[in-house]
Image (cartoon, helix red, strand yellow):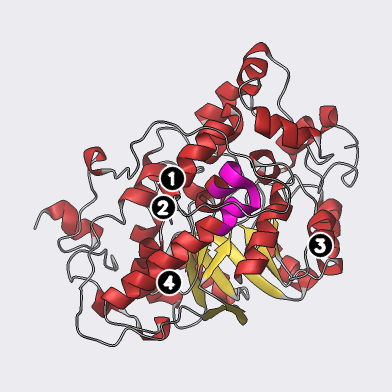
Amino acid sequence: MADSDKVRGFRLWKRPSEKQKCRTATESEPTNQTKGKGQMRDLSKMTCIEDLRRVAKFKMPKMFYDYIDSGSWTQHTYRANTTDFAPIEFRQRVLVNMEGRSLESEMIGQKVKMPLAIAPTGFTGMAWADGEIHAARAAEKFGVPFSLSTMSICSIEDVAENTSAPFWFQLYVMRDREFMENLIKRAQDAKCSALILTADLQVLGQRHKDIKNGLSAPPKPTIMNCINLATKWEWCWNMLHTERRTFRNIVGHAKNVGDLSSLSSWTSEQFDPRLSWDDVARIKDLWGGKLIIKGIMEPEDAELAVKHGADAIVVSNHGGRQLDGAPSTIDALPDVVQAVGSQTEVWLDSGIRSGQDMLKAWAMGARGFLTGRAFLYGLGAYGEDGVRRALEIMYNEMDVTMAFTGHRNLSEVDKNILVEGTYPLPRR
């Protein structure tokens, strides 16, 4: 075994090369598809998340697709989040009863059809008009939690008025603490059942594509944007029929932010680099409910999160959009589980593209998952129906794979379903 493998804490597990990166669909780009209002599309031919990604890429404006499907700097961590799942192998068992299977679980005391929640993502309403509302409805119907970002297009109130199930709200800590406290109050008034504190965005990682595309909501009427939008007629048609086209949690609520011209300067100044564990204690007191801390990558931070009252922590590197060169989340998971897995719920975010990914991470100790890009591909492709299909795909993959490993209930699954030496181990 090479010295580098010893340092990483693995046995036979190695990071795959770029040539090993898996792409499942190779057909030409599909054409736009529309359906009458109220009718459910037949998306049975969409058999994997990759299929939805390809349709979303075709339908969405370039700047918003690139915002979803890219990372910071060289995108090394962004790619590793997905490719590092590939070497992990399952042990197949045969001649066992596979009837009556269940993926039901709980996330912070909430019963879920499978241990997956829709992650809080900014600009969701730019993937599809009123996107947050559509995604929340799909999650509610399917039986998994939905979480809304501070930087959403639809506001807390918009989502609450158009859904019936309580949802989670994700908080970015701003320099304007009065605005932040008001956000928490609005989430309480909307009966949000949990608060997600994102801990890894005190400063913004450089995302080359966003800078080059001039990312904004709505798109600026530049020549290149107009040319691109001219080919996205379904997206444009949907956007013409909604008034929700900017960050409605902020505009009209934050001081001196009454229109788009003041929004960009306000947001660039507002992310607070002073955020510390002392702030976590105050936020928990203000909130008074379930607190989830997202952005944990090291056991020391996991221990501090537990000390400060986290009901769950999310192993996340912001989808590879912050610190490029950080480990993948599946690589970081073993140390965090070893440190605090017996004290709080450890979830995993960043890199989940299939139900098999979830089952591998569950076997390694994760007890919940957040999906961002997978649901956004579905949303950008087919709106609410696409989110529903993304959830169906991931559920089926996890369910069938669990059966092949010889189990009928997710609670029985542990590391014994994995081939020894193919998965990362704790470094310590």
Q: Secondary structure at mark 4?
A: loop
Q: Are marks 1 and 4 in contact (CB under 8 Å)?
A: no
Q: Secondary structure at mark 3?
A: helix
**Residue at image point 65% right, 45% down:** 122
Which amino acid, by three-letter code, is at mark 4?
Answer: Ala
- Disc 2: which residue: 48
Q: Secondary structure at mark 2?
A: loop
Q: CA distance from mark 4 to mark 3?
A: 29 Å
Q: Are marks 1 and 2 in contact (CB under 8 Å)?
A: yes
| Quarter of the image where the C terminus is located | bottom left
Which quadrant of the structure image shows residue 191? bottom right
Relative to residue 7, is residue 318 drawn left or right? right
Which amino acid, by three-letter code, is at mark 1?
Answer: Asp
Q: CA distance from mark 1 to mark 2?
A: 6 Å
Q: Earlier in the sequence, mark 4 or mark 3?
A: 3
Magenta stretch holds residue 384: yes
Q: CA distance from mark 1 to mark 4?
A: 27 Å
Which amino acid, by three-letter code, is at mark 2?
Answer: Cys
Give the magenta-colored segment's residue range. Answer: 378-388
x, y percent for residue 213: 59, 23
User: Looking at this rendering, what residue extends furthest in the top direction?
Assistant: 223
- Disc 1: which residue: 51
- Disc 3: which residue: 160
